[in-house]
Amino acid sequence: MLVKIFWDVDAAEGMGRPVAKEIADILQMDIELDESPVMLTGFNRHRKQFDAGQILERIQLYKKGHRIREPVLLVTGKDLFIKGSDFVYGLAKEAFGAAVVSTARMQDEFYQRRTDLHALCMRTATEGAHEIGHLFGLSHCPDISCVMFAPENRDQLDRKSIFLCRECRSKLESAISSSHPE
Ligand SMILES: [Zn+2]
Ligand SMILES: [Zn+2]
């Protein structure tokens, strides 16, 4: 199974490769990394954030126009929201095969702390893998150490491990095998 990662211009430079490698390890999938060709829309002037739903629509349009069938995860540095939430780390829509994850609130500068690049890379990989999990039909997991657990803040995010629990792992494996019948 191949998943494409689109790395947006304002996502942390130089982190694409390590993040892609971690995601490949977490999900045990092949990951292809590219600079993002998708022009992002959906900026809300009042909130100074981007509408994550609109970004998914852009990705879907791009995929259609370029006949991309693989799931796509876009990684951006832009702060994201959805209606009813102050912010989201990411969003996925299985029907589009499109997901987005933001590093904006994963950075330590956001909380006036010194940036720890390794921690930032692991957070981005964990949440990126989480959104890709949704693209394969996985839902949220109550196990706080599982990648599919939905963190509400960064402390919860950092308490997550980089592994899927046994149940989520087997759901993912059966989703992959049913999308590729032998
Ligand atoms: Zn989720
Ligand atoms: Zn789980």
Image (cartoon, helix red, strand yellow):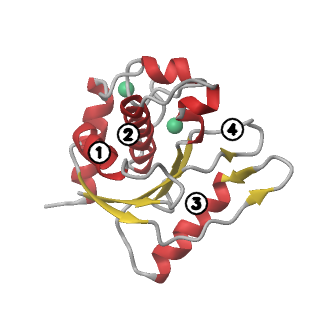
- Whether tag 4 and tag 1 are in contact, CB under 8 A, the answer is no
Q: Mark 1 points at which residue?
A: 18
Element under disc 4: loop
> Label 2 CB, ligand 1: below 8 Å?
no
How far separated are the C-alphas under marks 2 and 3?
19 Å
Of label 4 and label 3, which has the lower sequence position?
3
Of label 4 and label 1, which has the lower sequence position?
1
Q: Mark 3 points at which residue?
A: 56
Picture quarter containing residue 127?
A: top left
Dot 4, crowdedness within 10 Å: few (<14), some or many (≥20)? many
The residue depicted at 86 percent of the width and 50 percent of the height is 46
How far separated are the C-alphas under marks 4 and 2?
18 Å
Of label 4 and label 2, which has the lower sequence position?
4
Element under disc 1: helix
Of label 3 and label 1, which has the lower sequence position?
1
Q: Mark 4 points at which residue?
A: 87
The residue closer to the viewer here, 41 or 59, is 41
